Amino acid sequence: MAQGSWAFPTKTEEWKINLDGNLGKNFVTPRGLKQNLLNQLVRVQGIVTRISIAKTKLQKSYHYIEETKQGYVQNYNDQYQIENI
């Protein structure tokens, strides 16, 4: 387990965005995903024919202890992070 640092952020914000409307040429199928759509908002429509289990990787967790009013940030590093190269 990685060592935690006591640099707990003082303020965090959570944003939830719901977009609705016509995306024009950015409304594609999975086969239509090409490099020209990088850094653009796209809507992908299709039928799921196969799925696999994706292992999520926890990178950072924030812990706050209400009784002591202290918190800390725990970083979890793995072999695929660029900082480890």
Image (cartoon, grey):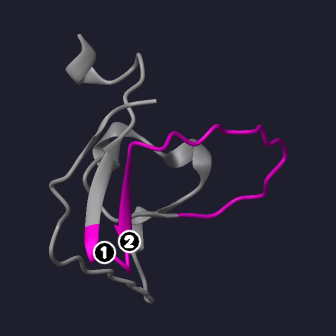
Q: Is residue 39 left or right of residue 34?
A: left
Residue indicated by mark 2: 65
56 in relation to 78, above or below: below
Predominant SS along the magenta part: loop
58 sits left or right of 11 in the view: right
Q: Where is residue 18 in the image (x, y as percent from the top left)?
A: 43, 87
Which of discs 2 and 1 lies nearer the camera? The answer is 1
User: Distance between the Cα atoms at labels 2 and 1?
Assistant: 6 Å
Q: Looking at the picture, does residue 75 appear above or below residue 28? A: above
The amino acid beneath tag 1 is Thr
- The front one of 66 and 49 is 66
Q: What element carries label 2?
A: strand
Residue 11 or 18: which is nearer the viewer? Answer: 11
Please give the residue where the numbered disc 1 appears in the rendered image: 68
Q: Residue at x 17, y 66 (%)?
A: 9
Task: In the displayed orientation, state which residue is furthest to the right.
Answer: 49
Q: Observer-nearest residue: 64 or 13?
A: 64
Tell me the quarter of the picture where residue 61 sits: bottom left
| Discs 2, 1 touching: Cβ within 8 Å | yes
Q: Which residue is drawn at 32% across and 82% down?
A: 15
Q: What stretch is highlighted in magenta?
A: 44-70
Q: Residue at x 46, y 30 (%)?
A: 1
Q: Is residue 21 above or below residue 65?
A: below
Report x, y in % for residue 64: 36, 69
Q: For the residue carrying disc 1, how many other residues have a C-alpha within 10 Å: few (<14), some (14-19), or many (20+)?
A: few
- The C terminus: image quadrant: top left
Residue 21: quadrant of the picture: bottom left
Name the spot of residue 20 as percent of width and height, x first: 45, 89
- The label on residue 40 is none
